[in-house]
Image (cartoon, rainbow, N blue to C red):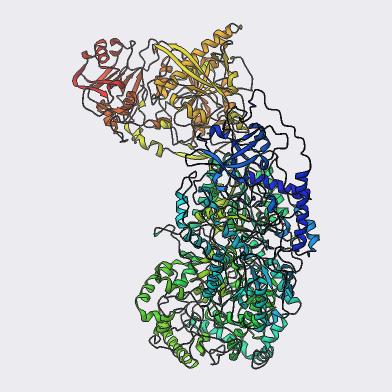
Amino acid sequence: MGNSYAGQLKTTRFEEVLHNSIEASLRSNNLVPRPIFSQLYLEAEQQLSSLEAGSRVDNEEEEEEEEEESSESSSPPLSYQMKPPPEGCCTTDGFCQAGKDLRLVSISSDQIEVPSGFLLVGAKSPNLPDHLLVCAVDKRFLPDDNGRNALLGFSGNCVGCGKKGFCYFTEFSNHINLKLTTQPKKQKHLKYYLVRNAQGALTKGSVICWKGAEFRGRQASSGPCSSTLFQLPESSGAPLTTTSELVPAPNPNAPSGTQQTGTISDHLPSTAALGSAVYNGKDSPKQQLVKNNLPALTRPSVLGTLTNPGPPKKRHKGWSPESPSSTETWNLQPNLQTPNRNKNDVGGLSCLTHSTLVGPVSSPMVASGEPVSVPDNLLKICKAKPVIFKGHGNFPYLCGNLNDIIVSTLLYTCYRNSQSISRVYEQYGASTVQPISEEMQLLLTVYYLVQLAPDQVPLIEDLEQIFMRSWRESHLSEIRQYQQAIPQAFPQVPSQIAPMTSAQLPWLAGLAASSCNDSVHIIECSYSLAEGLSEMFKLLIEGKLVKTNYVVIICACRNRALDSCIAVTGKYQARVLSESMLTPAEYQKEVNYQLVTGKVETLGSFFSTLCPDGDTEVLLDKFYQENQGQRSSSLSTSVNKPTALDITGAAVCTSYNVERHQIRPFQLAVAQKLLSHVCSIADSSTQNLDLGSFEKVDFLICVPPSEVTYQQTLFHLWHSGVLLELGLEKEHLTKQRMEQYVVKLDAEAQTKFKVFLQNSMQNPHTLFVLIHDHAHWDLVSAVHSLYPQAEPSVGLVDRLLNCREVKEAPNILTLHVTSFPYALQTQHTHISPYNEIHWPSSYSNGIDLYHENKKYFGLSEFIESTLSGHSLPLLRYDSSFEAMVMALGKRFPRLHSAVIRTFVLVQHYSAAMMAVSGLSQMKNYTSVETLEITQNLVNSSRQCPSGHGFMVVLRIPCIPLAAVAYERLYHVRERLSLADNFEIILGNPNSGITIGKHFVEQLKIWQKIEDAEWRPQTYLELEGLPCILIFSGMDPQGEALPRSLRYCDLRLINSSCLVRTALEQELGLAAYFVSSEIHMEKVVVNDVLESDPEKLSSTDNEDEEIVTEGSTSEKRSPVKRERSCSHDSASSSLSSKASSAAFCIESSPPLPTPGDVAKSPHQVLSSSTEENANNCERQGQKVEKGAQTVISKHLPAAAEQLDSKQNIKSAQISINLLSSPFSSSSSSSAPTHSSFILQTSQCSMTKASKQPPIVFLPKLVYDIITSTDSSGLPKSSSLLPYHSVMWASSFRPVMSKMMTCTEQSLYYRQWTVPKPIHMDYNNRNEGRMDTFHPRRLLLSGPPQIGKTGAYLQFLSILSRMLIRLTEVDVYDEEEINIKLQEEADQCYHQPGDMWPDLETFKKIPFDYTIHDPKYEDASLICTRLQNLNSDDRSMGRKQEDMYMRRQTTRMRLSKYAAYNTYHHCEQCHQYMGFNPRYQLYESTLHAFAFSYSMLGEEIQLHFIIPKSKEHHFVFSQPGRQLESMRLPLVTDKSQDYIKSPTFTPTTGRHEHGLFNLYHAMDGASHLHVLVVKEYEMAIYKKYWPNHIMLVLPSIFNSAGVGAAHFLIKELSYHNLELERNRQEELGIKPQDIWPFIVISDDSCVMWNAVEIDCSGDKKSEYTWTERNVSLKQILQHIEVTPNVTHYALIGMRKWSSKRNSGEIREPFSCCHVHDFIMLNVDLTQNVQYNQNRFMCDDVDFNLRAHSAGLLICRFNRFSVMKKQIAVGGHRSFHIKSKVSETPVSTAPAQYICAPDSKHTFLAAPAQLLLEKYLQYHSHRFFPLSLKNYSHPVLSVDCYLNLGPQIAVCYVSSRPHSLNISCSGLMFSGLLLYLCDSFVVASFLKKFHFLKGATLCVICQDRNSLRQTVVRLELEDEWQFRLRDEFQTANAKEDRPLFFLTGRHI
């Protein structure tokens, strides 16, 4: 790279990795650089890690360094052969190769453009010792003031010629003509910084401090990072790996070059997990391990096993700079409080692992060699292992009893990261903004620790935010100044605030700690931390730190840097922090070890001694024997009591109506959003998804390896019916068939997945949707599997879903579905932010967007319930349980708290069951909460006639502990004879559900299931079953819970793993839908409660009054809210209710009094035994009374009737668990099971489904969930989002409560990066668009909200849309005027005839009547033979409604369809003009001119001819001038091509016109020309690059279809003449040249043929079938018609589904042809299309062709289908006022006006106004003709549509023309339209008119009008008046048409 490495590394692999990481850094241009190497010069001050013995390392480093220096200085320089300069370039010294002067003296006053992030430096040339050459160099490659932190390599620009992008110094030195004889090195030749002086001239500045070898290894750095400490991977604000991290600027508009100006001071190597480490020493990783004799637990290096994602060899400018090398350190675990141990640690037990973290090692630079001895029995004395956090400076050796302490670098890393905060502002100029000082950091830490409550644990996020705020406040003015500054300007240095000195620090810290009652203890040392640690250990042993939670040790001397550390000695805090270091695998291993080795037996024996009556087992056995006989009878009577009520009129329980399978409005909306995103992918120009090529949808749903989730997905799939709807399965769907579509991501998943991939490859026309449900579950990289010893399912998602086949398959769409998308929203995500779909909000601006009958209760609603002042919180914690756990934690310090918590909770449940069953003394050994749960559970089934009950979920993440709890609770339930009362279910993710036979039978009865083998397989099927579900597994895996869930007991969740996803998915278990009718009524009740303070005190029955509408609750002030947040749920439980009623009635209300509420509405309240007994006695009476009266279930029930004014003196429960672990708060006896039954019994399942479940949390989690920041955002939201991601920087903004899901996504995409264990880690093109996978979508929504239903619905509507894409709306209308058809008295052809016989066809009379349904509103053309009456014509309808009201039918596109531009398939790509890289084909423009006498001028047309189509044309040889279009011979019989060129006139349909005839022509060669207007040429060429275009002259830009037809025909005839002349020279007769062309509408989509079978006995009998055929087949059939050149026009009928066999009896008709015609341009030479016409020009042309004696043949066997296209065509003409800019529609009556009047002129062609006016208002000209079909209007030489209520009779004035016989026919009007010289007076006198008949003459101008009247002698028979003259409403320049009307005399 042009620079030698500073230190010669001894492992080539490490060199390679280093090289690659440097390459990546050099190319960095991103806002947030990825963690790469920071110390690229391998400086010796930053030693290895604290694992290495100091002196030994120092000695070796110095030796190596001396060797290196001597080799540099003493060895002769290597000869260097300079590359010869390019020929002709400048080689003068001081000038660059472009000849520009670079000498400082010459250009010092010049204005030199310096790119952002570059500096001007002076280079020394050996040939010009007195001069400096000016260069611009990227400052990242220059050192800082200490000679460090320069990136290896080079990036510079030439300031002379401006050439940029020199990536090698060698190359640059050649360019600036340094002419070196040695290897070019920037260190040797870049000598000085250049600065501008006061006059603005460039002058020599300070020396560039390269390398600083004189400092190496000899100078102790005085910064906060002076010693390198062993760093555990942790997920504090900024990751360990980000040592070179640059913080993004707050100014988002700053150019990328300015973003990376600095690097963190004193970067430290991060010794990483799994070894991928950065070492600063000279030894290879192997040697380091050997040297230090490290145990296996210290993360062995695995550099050799990592893939190398490094860059290509050359630095291509387009290559993304931040593809990080594999040398990144690994950050494994998400705990925010403390660092973690490596997941690969061999021993899983704390006693082993902790010793390795602090072994007898120290920082190599420790001042004192004295080790600190950890005293023996520390754990035994302290009851917890102290956690020591390294802070600033040096940390001493520790030796002795290292098992009893834990050392962490988390705080050190936090301090270091906060030092980097100000770096972002360096880009604005001189670095005057100082980072927060070490002293201030430590003082702020002390402040933070002082304000922590005794039961709080420090969070690193809190500390980071404190540092951030402090720094921002202290530098606010500078920050603002720099944000407003221009980057080149150097702002004024602000005056410095006097910093705190190190001498002041201990005093200030002591002052801060003085107020905290010794919870924080400060120890000041004078020499080193060793003496402070020794003193701390001494105080601990002496028991003098019992009340102290934190010990801060400060060593602050004036002449030395600050040393500090913080020890956590509080038993609770130390335990939580130490346990949070365990990874999930280690956590399970530890618990397993304690269970297997019998360590928990001490805990069990402790519990057994608690009971005053002896062992609980003895009690249970005694109870079992005493009550065995008695219980069964009493139970039956108690259960039957409510049943007896049924006879007296009470209703049977009808609450079992589970609605699971209806699609809710929300789900439909989400499905449509998904579909919309898929369509937008398809519509984008990237061609990543070709929806048009897919015919059907297939799918595979991937779910986590949970049997319940798997069965649950199958269950949803079965009931959705989507398999049948997609056509994937038939009616008789079996479960085995259904299982093909759902795969459980376990070891067997690969087989199903392989089949899926094979199917996708074999079926390219099927769109396969790969749905990854619960997508956050396993994101482990397949390369970096953390658990080599674990099950093979780890990393499976990455192996399967990210495999090359899935990524590259064009027909696989991947949909990730999750409630917690945060881990998929990192800087390296595969999913584009545009492809994210978030569940919509229910409300927008207070409006209910989706009317649903259920309200969703999720995390925010649960939190809201804790803030409501008048209702019971749904989130609670259990203070007595927490106190018991804390006490036992002190008693058993070596047991994991999960074990203690589980045993305590199981003991509480056991005792509660015993108390409920009659062993009243046991209620003292449980908590109020547990007693409430158990009591209500046992009684739930008794309150329902059918035995319905509710579910209690007991979450125990650790599977071994769950098994222990299940066995214990099952045993207690059996001994208490409660086996038939409720079930206990062990929910293990790896196995299905097992429940007792009795309960299976109950469920079958409730669900009306008759299958004898049926067993519940999902939790949803446990609806109504009274049960305790022990929910195990480290993480929930998407299991849904039934609506009968009542209590969600999460007291045992792992509270030390504080990660947002982990917390939210645990709380997601309780997410719930509540019937929204309830909360609508509740609003009124809430208002009443709020307005009545006395009622507020009598808190309602919790089961009846749960506020479900948070918005109606009173929002308290922050102070009040803070107090009310401490919901110890004793207040919301039975509040130590001790009377018999209290334990039997689920609905017994708690009783806080007005006084209590005033103190804290939700405080833990309890009362004296006597008062409680009285209350409950009254309560029982009131309930009985209430049972006799009708109480509305929405009003406060029994509780409201109690004496709410009584002021019960209550005291908070304080159970001193040390002296008496279970002191009772109530001593009255518990009732027996049958003592009281609530007579107003209501099914508890019904009640449970009408309100959300109650959730019990650990206190630690409760505090985090319910505490909010200043914006109101729950603290849990700002936690690290996922354990395998880390924050990109600690310098990040705080999330806001107002953030939408999209904004949160963008936040995480900017501020989180995946760790190397994450599957997205290697997707590292750094935010460039190409890192996003184009066919990958992310659907996120709250848990249990219905995402499965939404994506199944999406599959359904996607399938429907694909079918819709393969379908088309075609016009399906019966032919009109069938009754008017002349009845043929003979059949001219046989039904089976393939072609018409010419002679026979000549005998067929022409049918003048129009039958095409599109002309239903056109004037009828009558003949003499017709006998018309008004009933035969339908009433006219508005033309505007025609499009809307025309009848269509939906048809599936066949393989022979014509397509628009949206169709892309492999076969079409070349035809459409797209090569594989989608570049447009070349095409050339050719002019083609011919003269036309009728127009009186030469017509010049332009052809655009693609290169690929030039073979259809003839060009002149010298000039390549277009001569003619090649035409085949009549005699050609080839089947490979179509002889007739096809012309398609089109306007406004560049996207929607059906011009892709590739499939219609069945791939046959054909010539297709699009006829377009000049102004539309560019857009048509863009969409159809490979089509030939015929561009009409600009004068026709506003013309109608008649002009296009006219020019097509004239051009074709002219071309025919040219071809005849050309081929005549080749000996071919002129009549042998093919004379036909095809004129096709742009909406012809498919063609059909009728096949007739005449094999019947009689000739008249035949059968026929119609099928879709290719256009090729039809055209080739017509082209071989015998005597085909004798036909002038050949067409086919319009398709209609309503045609019957009688109508195709005659296979050929002589009638009008439309839409798709073959035109003989030779025969029709003298019959022209009217170029002025907009409508009915084909009818007009047909009539004139027939009158000329030409044959018009319609093949009735063939039909064309026309697609309904809503845009373009004749609808593209808008008639609007010429004056007004606003498009105001004008009525047709306004289209004409009197000449010379002041009428508003219209901006429309005169001909269009005329045609439109006559269509709607011709009755004003021809009043006698209205509905007078017997007396039509005589129309001479033209057909104009006079509207459906007027009939016309067409006659031609041409000599020898064929006209109908008009003798005896009286006409009601005469229409003369632009009549030519063939119309003479004698011709008109042949016709007879009614008296009063009207005449209308239309001419181009008023002069012509008068001349025509005179020439035709019209005044002889017609009377004219001046006022009868009109004109079209056009301005004079627009050449209006003029009318003259008259009456027949």
User: Image height check: is 936 above or below 765?
Assistant: below
Residue 1169 makes an appearance in the image:
yes
Residue at horizontal 76 percent and vertical 77 percent from the top: 597
From this view, report whether residue 796 is shown above or below residue 807: below
Image coordinates of residue 298 in percent, x first then y, are 75, 63
Return the residue nearer the eye: 1282 or 806.
Answer: 1282
Instruction: Work out whether residue 1580 or residue 1310 is closer to the camera in this orientation and state it.
Output: 1310
Could you tell me residue 1128's position as x and y percent? 51, 78
Residue 979 visible? The answer is no
- Using the image, determine if residue 153 lies above or below residue 1897: below
Q: Nearer the viewer, residue 60 or 739?
A: 60
Residue 270, above or below 310? below
Left or right placement of residue 316 versus residue 1204 in this view: right
Indicate the quadrant containing the C terminus: top left, top right, bottom left or bottom right: top left
In this figure, what is the number of numbered marks? 0
Left/right of residue 1876 with respect to residue 1711 in the rendered view: left
Kindly give the residue lying farthest to the front in the view shown. Answer: 130
Residue pictured at 32% horizontal, 35% vertical: 1783
Q: Residue at x 44, y 22 (%)?
A: 1604
How far across and down, in percent of the image, does residue 68 sit?
A: 76, 48
Q: Position of residue 238 (x, y in %)?
A: 60, 58
Q: Quadrant of the N terminus?
A: top right
